[in-house]
């Protein structure tokens, strides 16, 4: 399939029958619909081009609507467009003409090939066999990136207006070989709060505690502290909290075939319990009139 401007297929909101908890769940990197023209322009085969995706993360958090929270999920793949970046983090080496002056061409993510329109997937594999036109790159941002973020902002604003607080959980996965620097610790989960700036310390500690109590190795901020979405939408002093959760793919995906492992349902059930526990934790704070304060 190919995407066209205004297509509803870009992403979807899985709505609860009634929103009963002040949470918004977001899965921006688990899209599995690869435009035919994109594949035709790529150097990579159908397996290699999927290496950077957060495989099935939307399925892992599929219980969110049943628990009373909306789940925003992308259908477009991360290799095609990355909404966890600034809107115009663009690599001039990828395009056949000059980029607009407002493009951020100097970020570390652009230098690494992982801008808004990525140049590579994991293991430093170049995606494209040709340079893109500037118009083509900007059209992806206009047709998909901007509507996606407009939708996310609406969900956050509506939740905050209804409950006086909003907790955004930005859902991702990480390669199974990730280890903490200077150690052999291989985390199962990483909770990112931009070093205490995107969410209250209480929320982060609660998330780590719930996962640890289930027997998982859970750490905070290292090596992933949260991307653009966490940083951009987390404003704890205003009651807007954003946490990024990274799940070790080796727990639930065969990283050779990218198919679900037999343990998939158990991990999904653990995350369903995690979502319930987080909702109860925030409800207890609200009932006690205790503010969730930033660190």
Image (cartoon, helix red, strand yellow):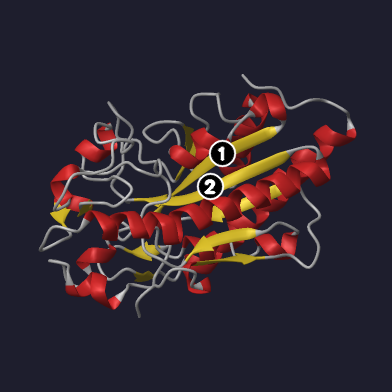
SS at circle 1: strand
Q: Is residue 32 left or right of residue 120?
A: right
Residue closer to the observer: 286 or 236: 236
Farthest-out residue, bottom: 1
State yes or no: discs 2 and 1 in contact (Cβ < 8 Å).
yes
- From the viewer's perspective, is residue 281 above or below residue 75? above
Q: Position of residue 217 (x, y in %)?
A: 47, 41
Count of numbered tags: 2
Q: Which residue is mark 1?
A: 243
Residue that label 2 marks: 170
Where residue 187 appears, x then y in whole percent? 41, 41
**Whether residue 192 is visible:** no
Residue sitting at x 12%, y 66% = 43
Above or below for 81 versus 12: above
Q: Position of residue 4 (x, y in %)?
A: 40, 72
Q: Which residue is at a point 32% across and 51% down the rendered structure image?
A: 176
Identify the mark nearer the N-term, 2 or 1: 2
Question: At x 27% / y 77%, what residue is drawn?
Answer: 36
Neighbourhood count class around disc 1 (C-alpha, 10 Å): few under 14, some 14–19, many 20 upward: many
**Residue closer to the observer: 90 or 274:** 90
Quadrant for residue 145, please give it.
bottom left
From the viewer's perspective, tell me whether residue 106 is left or right of residue 29: left
Front residue of 100/169: it is 100
x and y, in percent, of residue 133 in the image: 20, 58
Helix, strand or loop under label 2: strand
Q: Residue at coordinates 31% horizontally, 43% vertically from top-left? A: 178
Asked which quadrant contains residue 185, the reply is top left
Identify the image quadrant of the N terminus.
bottom left
Asked whether residue 282 appears in the rendered view, the answer is yes
**Where's the C terminus, which quadrant?**
top right
């Amino acid at each position: 399939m190919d995407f066209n401007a205004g297509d509803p297929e870009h992403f979807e909101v899985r709505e609860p029958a009634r929103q009963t908890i002040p949470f918004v769940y977001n899965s921006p990197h688990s899209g599995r619909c690869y435009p035919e023209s994109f594949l035709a322009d790529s150097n990579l085969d159908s397996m290699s081009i999927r290496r950077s995706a957060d495989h099935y993360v939307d399925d892992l958090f599929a219980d969110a609507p049943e628990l009373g929270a909306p789940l925003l999920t992308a259908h477009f793949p991360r290799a095609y467009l990355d909404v966890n970046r600034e809107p115009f983090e663009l690599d001039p080496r990828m395009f056949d003409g000059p980029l607009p002056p407002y493009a951020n061409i100097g970020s570390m993510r652009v230098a690494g090939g992982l801008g808004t329109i990525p140049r590579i997937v994991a293991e430093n594999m170049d995606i494209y066999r040709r340079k893109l036109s500037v118009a083509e790159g900007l059209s992806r941002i206009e047709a998909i990136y901007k509507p996606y973020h407009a939708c996310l902002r609406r969900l956050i604003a509506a939740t905050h207006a209804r409950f006086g607080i909003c907790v955004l959980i930005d859902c991702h996965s990480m390669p199974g070989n990730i280890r903490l620097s200077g150690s052999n610790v291989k985390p199962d989960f990483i909770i990112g709060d931009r070093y205490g700036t995107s969410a209250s310390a209480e929320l982060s500690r609660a998330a780590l505690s719930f996962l640890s109590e289930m027997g998982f190795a859970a750490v905070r901020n290292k090596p992933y502290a949260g991307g653009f979405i966490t940083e951009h939408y987390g404003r704890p002093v205003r009651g807007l909290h954003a946490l990024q959760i990274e799940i070790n793919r080796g727990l639930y995906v065969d990283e050779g075939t990218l198919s679900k492992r037999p343990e998939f349902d158990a991990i999904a059930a653990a995350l369903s319990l995690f979502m319930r526990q987080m909702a109860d934790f925030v409800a207890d704070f609200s009932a006690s009139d205790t503010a969730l304060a930033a660190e």
